[in-house]
Image: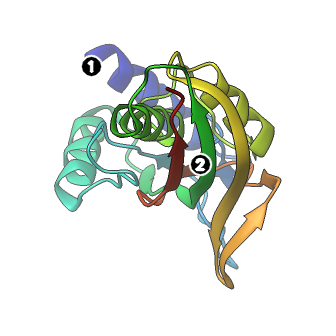
Amino acid sequence: TREWAQFLALAVRLAAVPGLVPTTTVFRAVEDVPDDPQPGTVGLVVVPDRPENPQPRPSVSLAGRIIDTLRPVMPLTAAVAILCPQYVPVSVRASVRLRRGVAALQGRAAVEAALESLLHPTLAAEPRWGLSLYASTVVAVLERLTVVDVVLAFELRAQLPTGLTPLEVVEVDACRGLYCSTGTHEIACEEQL
């Protein structure tokens, strides 16, 4: 929106003021600081609203439109760096007992939809930059579902450089970090007749 662009332009102007720190943080967004950071550069972490993509990243076109929107109001010496979030993809392996009368197919679909909604970076109720994800939080979300009676077994796994790793807490970068879904969960549903 125009108001958002005006606010970001103000941030860019502030960063371009001589004598301030070489890199300015705006909304917990920072660029990867090179050996010799340039004064006047503001890093903006951009997460596009793409609900169908579990790890949305700004396209070259979107980055260009953001910069084109800001350029007319930026000081001549200012620069904007459009940055991607640092995602930590997670998946869930769970066994759940469904409430009486809920079919396994229906229960599994509800559990998977709840997981994708919880883990998607733009579907969350509030921003969660830099917030860790706890296995107990995911279990609590699943047990609040109307189709679930109880979670019988649970494993939260993060895609780390070493591979898919079971964790109790998924830590993310404090500034650019977001957890997200791998899109591949293993859900076993036990029906009650």
Q: Is residue 182 above or below residue 115?
A: below
Q: Is residue 42 visible?
A: no
At 49% from the left edge and 56% from the top edge, which residue is drawn?
Answer: 185
> Which residue type carries mark 2?
Leu
Instruction: Where is residue 51? Give x, y as percent.
Output: 30, 38
Instruction: Kindly state the secondary structure of the residue where label 1 is placed.
Output: loop
Specify whether residue 191 is in view. Answer: yes
Residue that numbered label 1 is attached to: 1
Category of crowding for the residue at label 1, using alpha-carbon neighbours closer than 10 angstroms: few (below 14), some (14–19), many (at least 20): few
Q: Is residue 157 left or right of residue 11?
A: right
- The residue at 58%/58% (across/down) is 90
> Which SS class for mark 2?
strand
Left or right, 16 with respect to 104, comes to right
Task: Name which of mark 1 and mark 2 comes first in the sequence.
Answer: 1
**Quarter of the image holding residue 1?**
top left
**Which residue is tagged 2?**
178
Would residue 163 be found to the left or right of residue 135 on screen? left
Residue displayed at 16% across by 55% down: 61
